[in-house]
Amino acid sequence: MMPIDPKKPVTIESLLHLKRSERPPQEFWQQFDSELRAKQLAAIVGPKPWYRFGKIRGLGMALPASVGVAAAFGAAFLSVHEFRSASPQAVSPRVSNPMPAAVASIEAPAENISAKVVSTPETSISAPRSTAVLVAATSPTRQSIRPKNADANLGAGTLVVTTLSARPAFPDPFTGAVSVAAGTTETSMSLASAVATPAEWTQAAYVSRPAQSEPLARTLTPADERREALLSDPLPNSASAWTSANSSDPRDVSELSQERLAQAVRRFGVGGDRLLVRF
Amino acid sequence: MLDAIKVLGKTLVASPERSKEADEDLAVVRQVQAGDVAAFDRLIFKYRARIFGVVYHLTSNREDAADLAQDAFIKAFQSIHRFQGQASFFTWLYRIAINATLSHLRKNRRRSFFSLEKMDPDEPVSREVLAALTDKGGAERDTYTRELQEKLNEAMQKLSINHRTVVTLFEIDGLSHQEIAEIMHCSIGTVRSRLHYAKQLLQAEMVSYLRR
């Protein structure tokens, strides 16, 4: 061992060399290695970000952002398109339409509609210029109408007839309302009330009303729908619409009120220490 | 052209030992690139202390240094297929680590606190310097050593990031001017200038500990 010279000058370099002796203990490296191993595994098996899936390895470039933007625009367009075609469905006759009629958008001539309606209940028929369908119904004979299939999910160019059940007094008839919504709805009200056979299509009535200008204005928000479902009316749409349109008959009103009361009571139940409410 | 760049890269490696070391590293890197992932462990084992050391001296925080060193190895592992041998693996790895550290320091410019490793007073260099600075022994010497260490780290942290990096790589890690210039993407003159200026600042800060 060399003797240490206490008179040796101390420079900044020698002080910096002191820092070389700041070393972690051996245990530190065990932890370091284990952490590094874990990170390495995570890096190998970890999920890649979505934009790296499109990476073209040979070119070393990723898919341009414009592809994503185009996709977003496409999705937005489809959503708007779907909304426009489906928006009439959001109109509930019991809320916005005092008549027991269905709101629909129509572009095709009425004869075409009636001809297609009678072909088959619950059948989709191709209609060349139609883009969307709304189904609702009424009966000129004040039947209690219960739509079996009130929601028509239809693509472009289809026409649907929805059958509606009738009371036993009318064993055979189906009452259907058909509407064909055009892409650009200028005339926006159609009602087809069909009974029994094509021969009875004379009863079908087509009512035209001015189109409502803004589809959004006619659409209920989810909050409105919830509130409406909870607070207002336990009856199905058609019955409610019927009631509002035909409330002048006291017997019917009384009958419906009893039915509403019974349905409202049936919605509640007691299970153990819980109160059950069906919606 | 590619060969010329490779030759140029190798000439920047200072000593023959470094050149040999670079060739060995390159062989291991080729193994990793060929799919032998386990071969990368050898590179980790070889360079972990040095990488940790340089990051630690830049940050003066052992936890940050451990994280950053690990991240540097992960980044190197992830992008090793892009390593073409234009520079030595050692230089390439250093560059990754230092870039990550500089980025970390810039992000956390206001947050800096020390978490220092214990200085080993029994190392030959330390023992010599400490003996020249103080004739105390035992616990008093340990206290003095601790105080000196904190003062030195404070002075280092007062330097700008670039100056601190140059000082760390040259004085503590022992790299050549050429290697530092290659790692920091600057000229050798810039490295020398930064080193000179940084030492002046450090001397001003540590004047009470210097003895002429």
Image: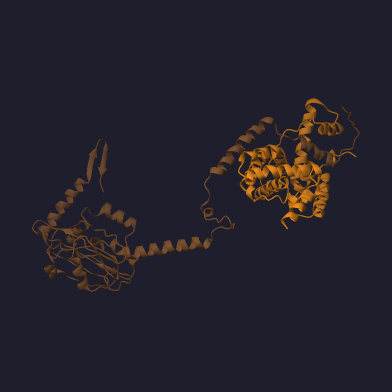
Chain colours: A brown, B orange
Residue B64 % position (x, y): 65, 41
Residue A106 at least partly seen = yes
Residue B190 % position (x, y): 80, 54
The residue located at (11%, 59%) in the rendering is A172
Q: Is residue A168 left or right of residue B161?
A: left
Instruction: Work out which residue is located at the far top of the displayed protein and give it.
Output: B138
Q: Is residue B141 left or right of residue B108?
A: right
Q: Is residue A255 above or below residue B30?
A: below
Nearer the observer, A247 or A63 = A63
Q: How many numbered callouts?
A: 0
Q: Is residue B67 left or right of residue A8?
A: left
**Quadrant of the snapshot with the N terminus of chain A:** top right
Residue A43 % position (x, y): 57, 44
Q: Is residue A109 above or below residue A23?
A: below
Nearer the observer, B51 or A211 = B51
Q: Is residue A3 above or below residue A74?
A: above
Q: Is residue A198 left or right of residue B164?
A: left
